[in-house]
Image (cartoon, rainbow, N blue to C red):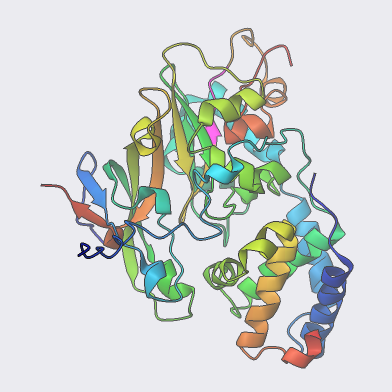
């Protein structure tokens, strides 16, 4: 688990905010508004994009061509957000996203990154022993599927388009979206029909 | 007479910087905690909001913030929580750029 | 802006360690320095983060998605696994 901030850090935050307010740089209201805005992004957005891509070939093509436009098409504002790239899983390749240098994450469509994504262990191990990391989620890949680790080092943010699992024939978009978890969108887990 | 001892060969590369964690052996045996939740506590959310507001206002870039995170000494880097590192970096940067006086943070 | 490299081209990441020369901010991971990979596709051009980090004027530099064979980076792993990384053009050189 993420540990609670120290009393020293809490005091520093209070002093820092007070100094910024005193200098007229920002207001408490702006902070409240910003938090509310950030809280609105969640993995449900990415899940809806994937579910639509599974049922709508034109949208799938758009998603793979320009993730940002595809997000906008779902009503998500990408203004100011980094470009969004989408990684298409196939019968041959499974993608796993990590940021070894910091914690770049497609926040516009997945919300806040989970604690584990930012952890030193994940950042250190995902590029070196991706299959062992996958195993910690209980994820094993079928024979013949290669792992492609995507180290998010620069201007793009990356989201995985997982394969639609068997057993979901005839499902509507909402039901499909319900099995696309945050972990599946990062690539540490696979969507399952039985979820 | 003894042979002259040759100088040690220069290392091929320096060790990776603290934040440059890809493949770092020291975390080899550290399990990843798969079921942790994403949204941070209020402290984290406030720091996160500061980053976004200050970034939008043109007072800093994310690259400057990262540079300041990377300047945190290694023991502290790993002892501090994620958003504590951010706070440390952003506040130091705002002092560096003269946005807030250093005394205001003490 | 058209870059110097195209999809499918073999490239080498420079074996360089600016860390040794003073304060810097680098987005090329240590584990890739000196390694060879294949350009998967160009990703456009972006202001150089190495300049942005110090609030210097930052010229746009072409960025590439470069694929590396994963087991050969670490001498372990499963054959066929790869690592795909965004790298700026000034960190790449062609291979003979």
Percent from the top left, x then y, of residue A168? Answer: 64, 11
- Pick the quarter of the image with the C terminus of chain A: top right
The answer to whether residue C48 shows anywhere in this view is no
Which residue lies at the image location 22% right of the left edge and 65% below the top edge? B4
Q: Which of C37 and A182 is in front in this view?
A: C37
With A127 as the anchor, is B33 left or right in this view?
right
Region in magenta: A160-164
The image shows residue A155, relative to residue B68, as above or below, that is above
The image shows residue C59, relative to residue A21, as above or below, that is above
With C77 as the anchor, is B48 left or right in this view?
right
- Pick the quarter of the image with the N terminus of chain A: top right
Report which quarter residue A167 is drawn in.
top right
Percent from the top left, x then y, of residue B59? Answer: 61, 80
Q: Is the magenta stretch mostly helix, strand or loop?
A: loop
Report which quarter residue A173 is drawn in.
top right
Report which quarter residue B100 is drawn in.
bottom right
Percent from the top left, x then y, of residue A166? Answer: 59, 9
The image shows residue B13, relative to residue C50, as above or below, that is above
């Amino acid at each position: 688990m993420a540990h609670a901030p120290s009393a020293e850090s809490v005091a520093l935050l209070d002093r820092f905010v007070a100094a910024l307010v005193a200098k007229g740089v920002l207001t408490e209201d702006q902070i409240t508004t910003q938090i509310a805005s950030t809280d609105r992004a969640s993995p449900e957005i990415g899940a809806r994009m994937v579910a639509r891509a599974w049922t709508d070939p034109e949208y799938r093509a758009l998603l793979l061509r320009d993730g940002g436009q595809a997000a906008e098409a779902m009503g998500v504002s990408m203004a100011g957000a980094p470009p969004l790239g989408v990684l298409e899983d196939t019968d041959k390749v499974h993608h796993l996203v990590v940021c070894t240098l910091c914690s770049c994450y497609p926040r516009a469509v997945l919300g806040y990154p989970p604690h584990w994504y930012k952890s030193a262990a994940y950042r250190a191990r995902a590029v070196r022993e991706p299959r062992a990391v996958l195993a910690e989620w209980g994820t094993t890949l079928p024979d013949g599927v290669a792992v492609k680790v995507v180290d998010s080092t620069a201007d793009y943010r990356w989201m995985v388009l997982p394969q639609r699992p068997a057993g979901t024939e005839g499902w509507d978009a909402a039901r499909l979206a319900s099995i696309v978890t945050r972990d599946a969108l990062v690539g540490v887990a696979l969507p399952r029909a039985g979820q | 007479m003894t042979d002259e001892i040759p100088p040690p060969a220069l290392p091929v590369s320096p060790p990776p910087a603290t934040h440059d964690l890809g493949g770092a052996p020291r975390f080899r045996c550290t399990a990843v905690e798969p079921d942790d939740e994403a949204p941070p506590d209020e402290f984290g959310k406030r720091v996160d909001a500061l980053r976004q507001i200050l970034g939008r206002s043109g007072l800093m870039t994310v690259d400057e913030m990262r540079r300041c995170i990377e300047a945190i000494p290694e023991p502290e880097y790993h002892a501090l929580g994620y958003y504590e590192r951010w706070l440390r970096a952003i506040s130091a940067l705002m002092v560096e750029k003269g946005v807030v006086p250093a005394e205001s943070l003490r | 802006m058209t870059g110097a490299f195209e999809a499918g081209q073999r490239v080498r990441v420079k074996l360089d360690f600016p860390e040794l020369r003073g304060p810097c901010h680098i987005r090329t991971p240590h584990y890739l320095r000196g390694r060879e990979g294949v350009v998967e596709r160009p990703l456009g051009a972006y202001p150089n983060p190495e300049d942005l980090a110090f609030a210097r004027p930052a010229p746009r530099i072409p960025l590439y998605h470069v694929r590396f064979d994963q087991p050969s980076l670490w001498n372990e792993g499963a054959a066929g696994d790869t690592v795909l990384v965004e790298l700026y053009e000034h960190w790449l050189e062609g291979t003979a």
